[in-house]
């Protein structure tokens, strides 16, 4: 994945002066993030994750910090930013905006029933937390896709096969999105690489950067797309079943949600494919990631309807 912003040891030392986490010893790039530049920082006091927030403006970042405070008040299992000496979570400079976190041990799990059960519990717990009033709607959905389709009309992307596919899919999905379904606090991007596991035990749900207030079924479907497929993008049906059973135990899906689940799984795949296409072909052209969007088209094509028994 691209590293949007570089960081020198001199710049790191300047940042850390505002924190009480020791003096820097080592700085390492962490590749793998889609929308930020991430670094592992080793200091005289410990190991930390430094995140340069490349994609979000200050207003969005302040909302993110408020949300993390809100989750902390509800004891939600995620990692929280380390405060500066002035008790601010967000380090702001003319060059970049930074948040620093504890570096937690663990890794990204492979899909399995045990993993999916814990993720289902964690998502249902999140959806039970009252949303903040200032949150916006889902940021990768139709509110972004519709203007994007207008922007590319007179560009070389107008007839791109992906744009043609996007228009076609959106046409049949739109009526499904208009159906009234329960709303709440969403993670918005719950993929396996946004979870942290110590072997098969969940440590935390990570990266609340797409947090929003919207239809909760978006989150359910996004988690299926992000956490229940193999690395070859084949559906792991046992993982889907375990996830839905755990989630449904804590927050039973309505009949309307069950009826719309298939459409929303395709919608979730479409939204992520759109984001990746725009990100790596238009906003930040990157040849190595330019075709990443196609992974989501594969997952959408490999989806099989799964309906658990419900009252």
Image (cartoon, rainbow, N blue to C red):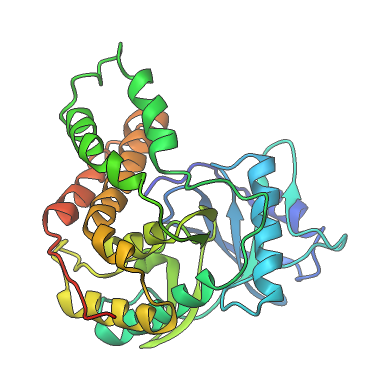
- Relative height, residue 88 to residue 121 (above, below): above
Q: Residue furthest top?
A: 154
Residue drawn at x 51%, y 69% as measured from the top left: 127
Q: Residue drawn 37% across and 49% down?
A: 1
> Which residue is nearer to you in this view: 45 or 79?
79
Visible residue check, residue 289? no
Closer-to-camera residue (225/246):
246
Say which residue appears at 64% left-offset and 54% top-offset: 64
**What residue occupies the far right of the structure in this picture?**
86
Residue 278's x, y, as percent?
A: 35, 34
Quarter-of-image position of residue 243: bottom left
Q: Which quadrant would residue 55 be assigned to in this image?
A: top right
- Residue 15 spot, x, y in % from top left: 74, 53
Q: Which residue corresponds to the image point at 33% horizontal and 42% vertical from the top-left?
A: 276
For the residue pair 196 and 304, the one nearer the viewer reads as 304
Instruction: From this view, report whether residue 164 is shown above or below residue 114.
Output: above
Q: Is residue 280 above or below residue 271?
A: above
Q: Is residue 39 left or right of residue 142?
A: right
In what quadrant of the picture does the C terminus appear? bottom left
Position of residue 65 measured from the top left corner of the image (x, y, whole percent): 69, 57
**Residue 284's x, y, as percent?**
41, 33
Residue 304 visible in the current orientation? yes
Does residue 203 sit above or below 69 in this rendering?
below
């Amino acid at each position: 994945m691209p590293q949007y912003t570089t960081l020198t040891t001199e710049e790191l030392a300047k940042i850390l002066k505002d924190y009480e986490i020791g003096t820097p010893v080592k700085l390492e790039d962490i590749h793998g993030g889609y929308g930020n530049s991430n670094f592992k920082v080793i200091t005289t006091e410990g190991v930390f994750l430094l995140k340069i927030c490349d994609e979000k403006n200050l207003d969005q970042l302040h909302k993110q910090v408020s949300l993390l405070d809100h989750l902390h008040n509800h004891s939600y299992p995620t990692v929280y930013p380390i405060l500066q000496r002035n008790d601010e979570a967000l380090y702001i400079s003319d060059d970049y905006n930074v948040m620093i976190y504890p570096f937690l041990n663990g890794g990204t799990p492979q899909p399995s029933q045990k993993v999916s059960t814990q993720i289902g519990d964690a998502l249902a717990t999140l959806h039970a937390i009252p949303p903040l009033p200032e949150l916006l709607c889902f940021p990768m959905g139709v509110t972004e896709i519709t203007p994007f389709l207008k922007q590319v009309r007179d560009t070389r992307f107008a007839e791109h096969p992906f744009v043609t596919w996007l228009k076609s899919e959106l046409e049949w999905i739109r009526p499904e999105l208009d159906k009234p379904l329960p709303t709440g606090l969403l993670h918005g991007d719950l993929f396996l690489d946004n979870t942290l596991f110590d072997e098969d035990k969940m440590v935390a749900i990570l990266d609340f950067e797409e947090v929003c207030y919207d239809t909760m079924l978006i989150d359910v479907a996004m988690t299926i797309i992000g956490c229940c497929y193999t690395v070859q993008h084949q559906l792991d049906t046992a993982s889907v079943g375990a996830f839905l059973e755990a989630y449904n135990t804590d927050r039973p899906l309505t009949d309307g949600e069950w009826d719309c689940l298939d459409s929303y799984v395709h919608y979730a795949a479409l939204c992520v494919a759109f984001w990746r296409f725009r990100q790596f072909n238009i906003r930040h052209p990157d040849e190595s990631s330019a075709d990443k969007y196609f992974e989501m088209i594969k997952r959408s094509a490999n989806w099989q309807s799964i309906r658990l028994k419900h009252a």
